[in-house]
Amino acid sequence: MLKKILYILLILLLGGWVGFWVNKTVQIKPSASVTTNPIGTQPTPSNREQSIIASQSAFLNAQQSVASLSASISTLTITDTILNPPAIELPLGFDSK
Amino acid sequence: MKAILSLLIVVILFLTPIHFISATAETAYQDYLFQYDQYRLKLNNFKVARTEYLKFQTLLAETTALDTVKTMMMQRNALLRAYLLLLTEKLNENKGLTTNDKQVYQTIIQNENTFLVNHTKLIGSISSVSDATDVSKQLESHYLVLYAGVRQTLTTLSLGELITRNTQYKATFDELRTLVELNKQTVTPEKQSTIDRWLLQINNKQNLYQQKAEQIITANSQLKGNTQTEMDEVSVTIQKNLNEAKQYLSEGTAFMQELVTLMQYKE
C-alpha cells in the first residue's frame, strides 16, 4: 500500500518536472517593439514641479468635481428624441367624397 | 422551512434591479410605444375602409368605415394620453425643476388629459360618418393648444437638465474659489492675478448661461403659433438657445480644468 502511494507521488513529481521544462523551453519571448508617441498629443508634464496645493485633499476633491462636471456636461443630450410628439393624422379625409 | 422561504424572498428583493421598482418613465415609454403601434395598425385599417367607402359607397363599406374610424379615433386619443403620461413621468423624474415648475406643466398636461377623456366619451356615441367628422373636428380645433403645451413641457424638461448641470457648475466654482482663497499666501502675486482673472472668466460664462436660460424661459412661456409648423419654428429657435446655454457651461468647465492645471504646478 505504502509502495503504491510512493509510486504515485514519484509519477506526479516527474510529470510536474517534465511539464515545467517543456513550458520553459516552449515559452515565446516577446519581440521588441518600437513605441511611438502619437503626433499632436502633448507629453505629460512629469518634469514640472507640483505646487503645495496639489497635494491637499481640498485640491484633489476640486479636481474630481471638475472632472465629474465635465463628464456630466459632455454626456448631456439637450433633445431627448424619444420624446418627440407622435405624428398623428387629424382630418378624417371623408371630405374628398 | 418558513425561515428559508423568508430568506429567499429577501434575497430576491435584494437582487431585483432598482430600475424595475422605480422605472415609471420607462414603463410609460413602453406603454406609449405599444399604443403607437396600435394606432398605426388601426389607422391603416381605417384608411383601407375609407378608400373602399369613398370608391363604392355601399352600405357595407360605410359600416366598415364607421367601425374602423371609431376604433382609430379611440386609439388616437389613447396614444395622446399615453404620450402625456410619459411627459408627466419625465417631469416627475427631472431633478433640475422645482416643484412649482413641475406643477405648472403637470396642470397643463392634466387639462389636456381631461379634454381627451371627454372627447373619447363622444366617440362612443358616433353613429354616422358625418358625426365622426364633427367629433374629430373638435380635436382638430383643440390640437394646437395641446401641441403648445407639449412643446412647452419638452423645453422645460431640457431646461431642467441644464439647471442640474448649472447647480453642479456653481458648486464646483465655489469649491475652486474657496481653494484659491485658502491658498493665497502660497502663490506668487503674478500667479494670483492670473488665477483671479480666470475665476472671473469662469464666473462670466455662468452669467452668460443664466441670461440665456432666462431668454429660454420667457420664449417658452410665450410660445404661440397659428400652425404646428409655426410652433415648430419657434421651438427650433428655443432649441438653438438651449444648445448655446449648454455651450457656455461647457466652455466654463474647460476653463475650470485649465485653472486646476495652473494650480497644480509651481510654474
Image: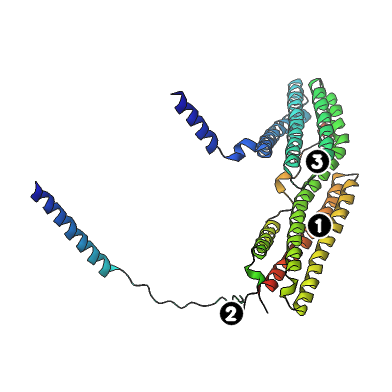
Q: Nearer the viewer, residue B174 or A95?
A: B174
Q: Nearer the viewer, residue B136 or A53?
A: A53
Q: Nearer the viewer, residue B38 or B33?
A: B33
The three-letter code of the residue at mark 1 reads Lys
Residue name at image x 81 percent, y 57 percent: B240
Asked if B202 appears above or below B8 in the picture, the reply is: below
Instruction: Using the image, tell me which numbered label, if any, was put on residue B99.
Output: 3
Check the residue under mark 1 and report the chain it is in.
B
At mark 1, the secondary structure is helix
Q: Could you tell me how far apart the alpha carbons at marks 3 and 2 are, in whole angstroms?
A: 52 Å
The three-letter code of the residue at mark 3 reads Thr
Quarter where residue B207 is shown: bottom right
Check the residue under mark 2 and report the chain it is in.
A
Q: Position of residue A15 (x, y in %)?
A: 19, 59
- Tell us which disc is closer to us: 1 or 2: 2
* Residue count near mark 1 (Cα–Cα under 10 Å), binned few <14, some 14–19, many ≥20: some
Q: Could you tell me how far apart the alpha carbons at marks 1 and 2 are, in whole angstroms?
A: 44 Å
Instruction: Using the image, tell me which numbered label, if any, was put on residue A47.
Output: 2
Q: Position of residue B222 (x, y in %)?
A: 91, 47
At mark 2, the secondary structure is loop
Q: Could you tell me how far apart the alpha carbons at marks 1 and 3 are, in whole angstroms?
A: 26 Å
Report the residue marked by disc 1. Answer: B240
The three-letter code of the residue at mark 2 reads Asn
Instruction: Using the image, tell me which numbered label, if any, was put on residue B223.
Output: none
Quarter where residue B119 is shown: top right
Same subunit, labels 1 and 3: the answer reads yes
Q: Are marks 1 and 2 in contact (CB under 8 Å)?
A: no
In which quadrant is the N terminus of chain B drawn?
top left
Q: Position of residue B204 (x, y in %)?
A: 83, 65
* Residue count near mark 2 (Cα–Cα under 10 Å), binned few <14, some 14–19, many ≥20: few
Q: Position of residue B101 (x, y in %)?
A: 83, 43
